Each structure stands twice: as structure tokens, then as C-alpha cells.
Amino acid sequence: MKRFILSIALSSLICSPLAFAGDKIDAEKLASYRSAIKELGGALKSELMAAKKAGGAIQVLTVCNTKAAPISVAVSEKVGLTIKRTSLKPRNAKNVPDDWEKAVLEQFEQRKTQGEASKTLEFHEVIEKDGQRQLRYMKAIRTAAPCLTCHGSEIDQKIQDKLNELYPEDKATGYEAGDLRGAFSITEILP
Ligand code: HEC
């Protein structure tokens, strides 16, 4: 089984500087979004590190499967925002982007093609949806080398078997290091 260094990958996912494209957003809100993403990233990381210690990649995969969603919900409730992960090629069908998220993910791909660094790929906008005014914010998640254990092209057979079992419609393979894997997405309902 391939070894992977999840901690390095996850810290690259968590510790990147933020910058905004588009309209201005007030600094306090920006700070709260930053810390919400940090909080979710940190919570995922500690679960995954514990799983890795306990049993390696299959254990980590199982934890991703059972804990990623409840951890996202718990952090969302704690910070009073809806925060999730999404992707143009999702593994879990529950992470399929909505129309706004899909457009922003496509915009991120374009901006990356035009040479922008993954770390600065962010976007926010106020939209009307479901009769509400929503402040929507997204920040790209980059694929690092260790992510390829479960998201790359040469996946260990045992891991692939487990993925097939848990995610028969998995689209989240075939990535290369440096590709965009997806994004964090925050929704705040405005008064
Ligand atoms: C041990 C296997 C494993 C590794 C390593 C791994 N992932 Fe995943 N990843 C998963 C599983 C399983 C899911 C589905 C989680 C769920 O059911 O919500 C997932 C889901 C995701 C999602 C949510 C969108 C989707 O596709 O459903 C993102 C974003 C993501 N991974 C990014 C990463 C990044 C970035 C890395 C490297 C830092 C990484 N993953 C490493 C197994 C892994």
C-alpha cells in the first residue's frame, strides 16, 4: 500500500492566505469566513490523523465516508454558517455543486488556466435564491501529491475496491498534483 503524508497535504489545504476577487466584503466577515474554513479543515484533519494512526488509508477512507458530512454540519452549526465542500467531479453525490457553485468552480478553473495561483482562487457574491438573499463565498481546494492515494490515476486495488463499494458513482479520480480538487463553500443567509 502506498504511504501518504496527509498532514502536509492538509496543512496546505488549511494554511493558505486569503484574497478576494469581485466586490468588497467587510473585514470582520472575511475573518469569520477564514476561521470557519480553518475550523472545518482542522476538525477534518484531526479525525483523519487519528484514523491514519489507527489503520492507514482504508481507515482514513472510512472516516472520510462516515465523518466528513457530520463534521461539516457540526462546524456549520457552531459558527452559524453553512459550510461544505464541493467539486466539479464529486465523489459523494451529496457534494454535487448547485448552479452558483458550479459556475464559480468553472471560473476558478479558468482563472487557474490564465495563470492565477490556486491559493488566491476565491470568489463571493450576494445572490437571490429560494426567496432569500444569500452571501455566498468559495475558496478553492488544491490537489496535493498525498491526495492522489485516493483521488489520483493509479489507485491501490484495495482502496479502489472500497471506493467502488462506497461510491459507485465516484467521479473524483484521475487528478494530478496541482489540479483543483474542489472548493469550500459558505452560505450565509442575509436579513
Ligand atoms: C484515504 C483516502 C482519501 C485521501 C488521501 C483524500 N481523500 Fe478526499 N475524499 C475521500 C473520500 C472517501 C471522500 C468522500 C467523503 C464523503 O463521503 O463526504 C472525499 C471527498 C473529498 C472532497 C469533497 C468533494 C467530493 O469529491 O465529494 C474534497 C474537496 C476532497 N476529498 C479533497 C481532498 C484533498 C484536497 C485531499 C488531499 C489533501 C484528499 N481529499 C485526500 C477520500 C480521500
Image: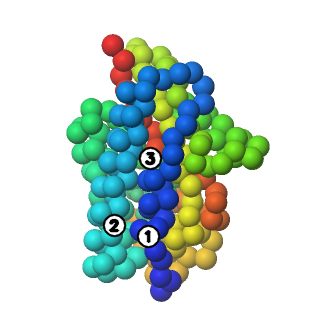
What residue is shown with label 3? 85
Q: Earlier in the sequence, mark 1 or mark 3?
A: 1
Q: Is residue 170 among the parts visible in the rendering?
A: yes
Are circles 1 and 2 on residues that touch, CB within 8 Å?
A: yes
Q: Earlier in the sequence, mark 1 or mark 2?
A: 1
Q: Amino acid at mark 3?
A: Arg
Q: Residue furthest bottom?
A: 1
Q: Amino acid at mark 1?
A: Leu
The foreground one among 129 and 162 is 129
Q: Kindly report the distance in space between the C-alpha atoms of the residues bearing marks 1 and 2.
A: 8 Å
Q: Is residue 150 above or below residue 188?
A: below
Q: Is residue 96 among the parts visible in the rendering?
A: no
Per the image, label 2 sits on a secondary structure element best described as helix
Queried on whether the Cβ of the residue with tag 2 lies below 8 angstroms from ligand 1, the answer reads yes
What residue is shown with label 2? 48
Q: Is residue 111 above or below residue 175?
A: above
The foreground one among 155 and 39 is 39
Per the image, label 1 sits on a secondary structure element best described as helix
Which residue occupies 59% across, 35% down? 104
Which residue occupies 37% across, 48% down? 38
What residue is shown with label 1? 6
Q: Which numbered marker is on residue 106?
A: none
Per the image, label 3 sits on a secondary structure element best described as strand
- Label 3 crowding class (10 Å Cα cut-off): few <14, some 14-19, many 20+? many
Queried on whether the Cβ of the residue with tag 3 lies below 8 angstroms from ligand 1, the answer reads yes
Q: Amino acid at mark 2?
A: Leu
Report x, y in % for residue 177.
Answer: 63, 65
Report x, y in % for residue 141.
Answer: 53, 51
Which residue occupies 57% across, 60% down? 143
